[in-house]
Image (cartoon, rainbow, N blue to C red):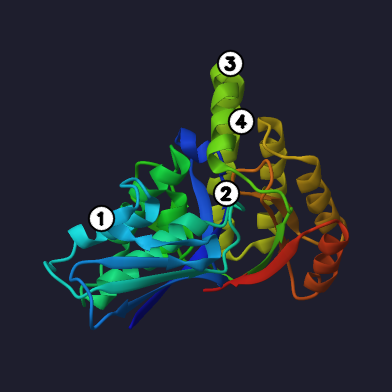
Amino acid sequence: MTSATAPGKVILCGEHAVVYGQPALAVPVRQVEARAILTEMVEGEHGCIFIHAPDIQFHGWMHEIAPDNPIRKAIQLTLEMIPVQDFPELKLEIRSSIPIASGMGSSAAISIAIIRALSGHFDYLLPPEIQSQIAFEIEKLYHGTPSGIDNTTIAYERPVYFIRGDEPIPFEIGAPFQLIIADSGIASSTSEAVSKVRELWSKDKSRYENLFNQIGSISHSAQRAIKAGQIHLLGSLLNHNQELLKAIGVSTPQLERLIQSARENGALGAKLSGAGLGGNTISLVTDETSEAVLAALHEAGAAGTILTKVEV
């Protein structure tokens, strides 16, 4: 048996603007993960893989499911990178504690867990850049025109400064900081949100490119603040980023309720995280404020919360 995991992720700043060439920052979230477990079957037909994904009620032989199925694609692309010609029948079990449709990278994490399990099973571990490249191809099946930030952050498992089309830049942080991720209870479709913003951009390019440029500037400043350990400055930047995301049109009344509640109860900064139109908010907190903010978020209607620490 071979088992491999991949963490979730949240975007700190840069959502939507990243699709238009601006930088974004994201961090891994290790409190949740996708897991892929490979079991070798002694008896069975060589080269066959049975997929068992109970969390999404999916079961079936790989060769019997559609060629564009993301799980099948993840297996195929990984096997193309591994020098193995024949293997005993395998069972692939997929589990995930990452909330779906919430901007936490669940699809990319599942792909990378599969990539790691397969490559590890055949003693041919693929480096993070190859894991990321494979997962990006699969993200296209899920999201249409993904930015690439999910697969990059999850594959490297480090804070990442990301500009689409450039090499990702994992970076060190000057001091640990804590985030509360709050689920709005409303599913968020990345493809729907990206399509909405693209339509609005096409009707008023000047206004939207100005908004994207401002968000890009925030990402630059936020990276410097994180590297310097300036957590209070980071909080102000997150708040500013939220106002721009609201202007872009991807915030909602429920997201705003959670954000306002977090700020009023001690969060240094709070914003939506991910595509918006639902999904999650993130709140920057300290040891002294985390308990009050958690309670306030639940009072404001959060469907669930995760307290995570971004560490050196």
Residue 165 picture quarter = top left
**Looking at the picture, which amino acid does disc 3 mark?**
Lys
Tell me which label, 4 or 2, sits earlier in the chain. Answer: 4
Alpha carbon separation for disc pair 4 and 2: 16 Å
Where disc 4 sits, the SS reads helix
**Looking at the picture, which amino acid does disc 2 mark?**
Ser
Residue identified by numbered label 1: 77
Tell me which label, 2 or 3, sits earlier in the chain. Answer: 3
Label 4 close to label 2 by CB (< 8 Å) = no
Residue identified by numbered label 4: 211
Q: Which mark is residue 221?
A: 2
**Looking at the picture, which amino acid does disc 4 mark?**
Leu
Query: Measuring 47% from the left and 33% from the top, which residue is drawn there?
Result: 20
Residue identified by numbered label 3: 203
Alpha carbon separation for disc pair 2 and 1: 37 Å
Label 4 close to label 1 by CB (< 8 Å) = no
Residue 296 picture quarter = bottom right
